[in-house]
Structures are given as C-alpha cells and as structure tokens.
Amino acid sequence: MRTRTRFSVILAAGVMATLGLAGPTSASTELQSTIAAQAEKAGLSESEVSKLQGQIDKQMAITPGGKQIGVNQISWRDGKAVMTFPLPGEKKARAVNEPRGAFGTPNCNYLWTCLYEHSNFDGRRLTWSDCNFENLANWGFNDQTTSWHNNQSRGTQTHVYNWTGSSWALLWTSTAPSSSSNVGAANNDKADGLWVC
C-alpha cells in the first residue's frame, strides 16, 4: 500500500511538470489528481503520460476552447463534444474507466455519434451529443475518418459530407443505432463535415 501511494505522489509530481504547472490552483490540482489516478489505474509510466499530454496539447492548439478532462480526453462545449486518444499500447480510443471491448466493436456511448480515425473503430475517437453541423477542419479531423458509430436515440440520423471545394457533397447517412467498421475506399479519409441529428 505504501509503495502504491509513493508511486501516486511521484506520478502526480511528474504530471505537474508535464503540464507545466508551477503552482497549483484548485482546477489544476483537481486535473493533476484525475490524471495521476487514471494513469495509475491504466498502468502508465511517466513517459507515457508525457507522450499523451503532447498529443492533447497539440489538439488543444488546433481546437481552442477545449478542456482536458482526463489523461487521454478533451471536451468542448460543456462536454457535448469529446476527443479521446488511444492509451499507450492500445489501438482503440477509450476513457480509462471504459472496458477495452473486443476487436472490431464500436464503443460510442448511448446518445452520442462517433467518428474514428482508423478502421475497426481504432485511432482517435471524436464524439458529439448535441445537434449541430460540424466542420471537421475545426477539430483537425478533416479527411481522417475511416469508421463510425451512430449510437444516438433510435431513428436519429447523422449525415457526413465531403467538401468539394465549392459545396458539401453527401458521403453517407447513418440512422441510429448503426455502425461501420470501414467506410470503404470511395469514402475513406474524405469526411470534412457532419450534421448530427
């Protein structure tokens, strides 16, 4: 027990250094604590946490207004949009508290629609729970979708578009609940926008 507590303290100190936090505020202390606890639960080393933090920092620079909510997650619009990065050693993005799931199975939460960077629901996962048009360039996710999962309420549709240079061309429409582990060669890495709901 004492070794585990010592590891948590060391990891928390490493997280503070990784996040570039000189003096703790209540918000930064809470985030540090969350990251340290999640890193310990996932069995991550300090260097793995640092690598994830680099990915998060890069994404937050691309899409301002985000808030880091965990060791591998960022949220926007009060949690209505979330990007999750795969944990080190894993291909599929999931929050630390989410089960791993079987290979090739989608993991979008109920009432959300998700885009995945790679086939079989692998790579970064970008999710929305509100009804909006989303320009994927704003998320650094344009031309990067290979699989998707629409897990909104039954019958709700998501329309995915490609920007042709002059207009939005429909690539596919999904009706919840549905998913595709691979959008196929004709649509792969062509999604530039989507209308959720």
Image (tube, helix red, strand yellow):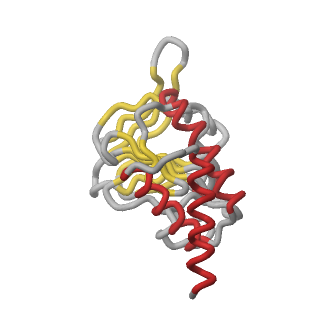
Residue 38 position within the rendered picture, expressed as x and y whole percent measured from the top left: 52, 67
Residue at x 43%, y 39% (from the top left corner): 66
Residue 193, placed above or below residue 11: above
Q: Nearer the viewer, residue 77 or 148?
A: 77
Q: Nearer the viewer, residue 188 or 57?
A: 57
Q: Residue 164 appears in which quarter of the rendering?
A: top right
Residue at x 29%, y 49% (from the top left corner): 156
Q: Nearer the viewer, residue 167 or 133?
A: 133
Residue at x 64%, y 72% (from the top left corner): 43
Q: Quadrant of the N terminus?
A: bottom right
Residue 37 position within the rendered picture, expressed as x and y whole percent measured from the top left: 51, 68
Q: Residue 187 appears in which quarter of the rendering?
A: top right
Farthest residue, direction bottom: 1
Residue 95 position within the rendered picture, expressed as x and y whole percent measured from the top left: 50, 62
Give the side of residue 14 with respect to residue 61, left or right: right
Farthest residue, direction top: 166
Q: Quadrant of the C terminus?
A: top left
Residue 20 position within the rendered picture, expressed as x and y whole percent measured from the top left: 58, 43
Q: Count the marks: how many?
A: 0
Residue 64, placed above or below residue 40: above
Residue at x 66%, y 52% (from the top left corner): 50
